[in-house]
Amino acid sequence: MPALGQAALLVSLIVTVWVLFAAGLGALTRSPGLVRSASRGLVASAVLVSLSTGVLLFAMLTDRFEIRYVADYSSREQPLIYKLSALWGGQDGSLLLWCFLLAVFSAIVVFSSRRAPQDLMPWVYATLAGILTFFITITAFVANPFRTFAAMEIPANGQGLNPLLQNPWMVVHPPTLYFGYVGAAIPVAFAVAALLAGRLDNAWVRATRRWALFTFGFLTIGIWLGAYWAYLELGWGGFWAWDPVENASFLPWLTLTAYLHSVIIQERKGVFRVWSFVLIILTQLLVVYGTFITRSGIIQSVHAFQRSNIGYWFMLFMGTGAVFALALLIRRLPQLRAKAPLDSFWSREGTFLFANIVLVGLTLMIFILTMWPVFSQVLTGQQVTKEPIEFTQATRPFFLLLLFLMGTGPVIGWKTKTGAELGRAFLVPAAAGIVCAAACLAAGAREPWSLAYFAVSAFVIAAVLQQAWLDVAERRRTTGEGLFPAFFRQVATHKRQYGGFLVHIGVAVMAIGIAGSSAYKKDVTFEALAPGEAVELDGYRITYEGFDIVNRPDYDAAVIRLGVQRPGSDSVEHVRPQRRVYKRSEQPTTEVAILPTLLPRGLGQLGRVGEDFYVIAVNLDVASGRGTFEVIVHPLINFLWLGGLLVGLGCVVSGWPPRREEREWIGEPAPAAA
Amino acid sequence: MSFSPKLLVLVGVLVASMVFLMARTVGGAKEDQLYYLEVDEFLVKPTDNPVRLAGFVVDGSIGKDPAGLAVNFQIRGESGARVIPVYFDSRTAGGRVPDTFVDGSQVVVSGQMGKDGVFQAKQLLAKCPSKYEAADPAGMPSRPGA
């Protein structure tokens, strides 16, 4: 059976090489026959790679331990869902999944090509085939998931998936992130095609707008899921640590964000065209860089990914891609220069330009700090690593500025405003920010950065809501509709704009969660409590009631019983943190227990909205029954999780397909996104 | 694209402030820099300055206090010929003793060498000793991003 998976992979490689050749030649000689053959080839390779992936999945589900990869990441007693997720539990399977997604996305591009600009398509196919060829080559020859044991060495059972990855969030986190990583290839292929074909208008941007949103949405949710998993499963009470692997996923997110904004200006005003090309190509390079970082082991990371030499293949691919893209861009540069002058910060273009500079600046800063162990080694001969707090200190003023710009954009709008008009437009949002900061001060918040972030977040939310209110009011004046019909019709006819608004609100809500939980977290470890003993933290009263030992097929657990009284409450709720030892790996893990406060219990408790009460069972002495518990009160943390969902929802709204009557517009200048 | 002078000044200020903060973050006094060393490198050139030390937990060397909050152990380099004793107390240092901290774990300790010849760790990171691919970042500093 593994031979079938490998054979399908090899045939798909031959097919993609043909596609690369046929599409390239077809474009140069303007031969529709060759291009058609290339498009069919892409579909065929999607079928073949799917077959190959299906074989590995089937082997995973049916415990075929003669395949090394299956033996490494699965075991007989592993629950079915984790047999499935073991497919991407390791490097080789992840790469196969990557090939699968890229091949399927490419086939979707082929099927939806009728509405795309035809002169670009041959080059799009060629570019996609080029990227696909690289990934399939690596999977088939360097990191092959179909390697088998010799007949004598086949193990009776597999090693099993790392217990830390046996968590529902970890089932969805990697594929979600891969959807984002792989999705980026589609706009990139169109950008490269536009440069190759010399068709430098907005056609490539319009054709890939939804792909770019799709990528952005999945990247956002993928990073969000990773943070949530870390928060729930790793039991260190944090969600982000500026680890190289985390940064590697965040860097393409930053450049993609800049790209999405850059193309709005490009479509409306015909400027920023160079920015758009550079940003989308940079996004793709950073995606590859992320794989290089995680796999090469060049930088110490707590994510102990299996080290392998594929990192250097990725570096080679990245270098070649960068040189190729740069050469293309330089060749087209004279045709891309914008003629329109940009005079004022207080214009839509002005704020977007600043947002682009801040985003690219932050990308560079985080890149340099992440790579500092390498750079310092080269510069001074000594390896110096940068601590998480140094990342935070260096970047937080600019994240704050970025947040501010997220509010100014919607307020300024497209029409040029006079000074007085601007003043009026900023009045309410600015007041909201000031009132918010004052209220937080009155409530006892003192940490300056958190106050600044709270104020600017309130400013952004107020700015967006004010703009929506004004739009709806305007609509009601002309149509005479009621408030809600007017609002929903306004959203339905301006999905792109209102999706963006929702994303901005979501990010502001996330900022509140991050700033609040970082600045006001309370963290105490209660040592060696005897059963029956009670302690207090920040108004919570915690009683250690005892523990139970639970034996499961794959692990043994000590389940701790804690009674918790929330601040000002008499009723006792129960939480059950656990300490588990997984049998196959003898790996101890901590299952935290969380008691969230989502709604306020009266006005005095308003500051506790979104708070988590979070307990980690640090140690349990079974003989004496004494337990050591770390208790953390995370104020506002749930705003972070809520905000992430709003961002995802915003992407859905923004990318929602237009209604039939609006479809006429596709291929024409995009409908106004005021 | 041409910019008005006013806009150029604004862009200049922004870029300059980014460069300034970066320079402050990566520059700084030599003794404030946290060097990253393998155990064997450290043994060749010991220092009293704070460092990050990477090595492996010597099998059977871990001693824990009853509450599981403080540990003493030895770390070795790749060769394993010589070892450094380490003490980590999560009461005074940051974080916890990570779940992945067991015999043979690959660890990174940040701290400095004490007068008694015991390395006083302020931070303890550990990776699984097995071939598992994702390790536990438990024990990371607990105040990330703002």
Image (cartoon, rainbow, N blue to C red):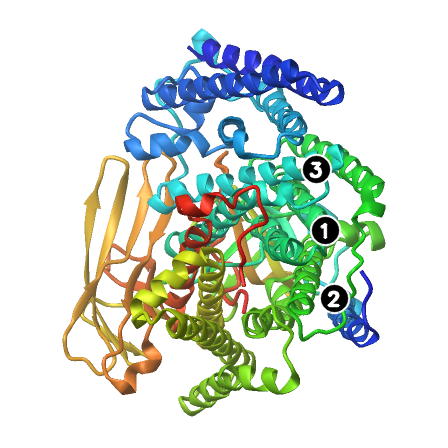
Which quadrant of the structure image shows residue A532? Answer: bottom left
The residue shown at (38%, 19%) is A59
Do callouts 1 and 2 point to residues on the same chain? no
User: Does residue A116 show up?
Assistant: yes
Quarter-of-image position of residue A170 = top left
Residue A204 appears at what percent x and percent y? 63, 41
Q: Position of residue A54 (x, y in %)?
A: 40, 20
* Chain of the residue where label 3 is placed in the rendered structure: A
Amino acid identity at mark 1: Arg
Callout 3, which amino acid? Ala
| Front in this rendered view, residue A606 or B111 | A606
Question: Left or right: where does residue A327 sit relative to residue A495?
Answer: right
Q: Position of residue B63 (x, y in %)?
A: 46, 54
Pick the residue in front: A549 or A31. Answer: A31
**What's the mark number on residue A194?**
3
Q: Quadrant of the N terminus of chain A?
A: top left
Going by the numbered disc 2, the residue's amino acid type is Met
Task: Give the distance between the C-alpha atoms of the residues marked 1 and 3, in whole angstroms.
Answer: 12 Å
Q: Which mark is residue B22?
A: 2
Name the residue tied to disc 1: A273
Q: Residues within 10 Å of mark 2 (few under 14, many from 20)?
A: many
Q: Earlier in the sequence, mark 1 or mark 3?
A: 3
Quarter occupied by residue B36: bottom right
Q: Is residue A193 above or below residue A429?
A: above
Q: What is the C-alpha distance between the residues marked 2 and 3?
A: 36 Å
Chain letter of the residue carrying label 1? A
Q: Nearer the viewer, mark 2 or mark 3?
A: 3
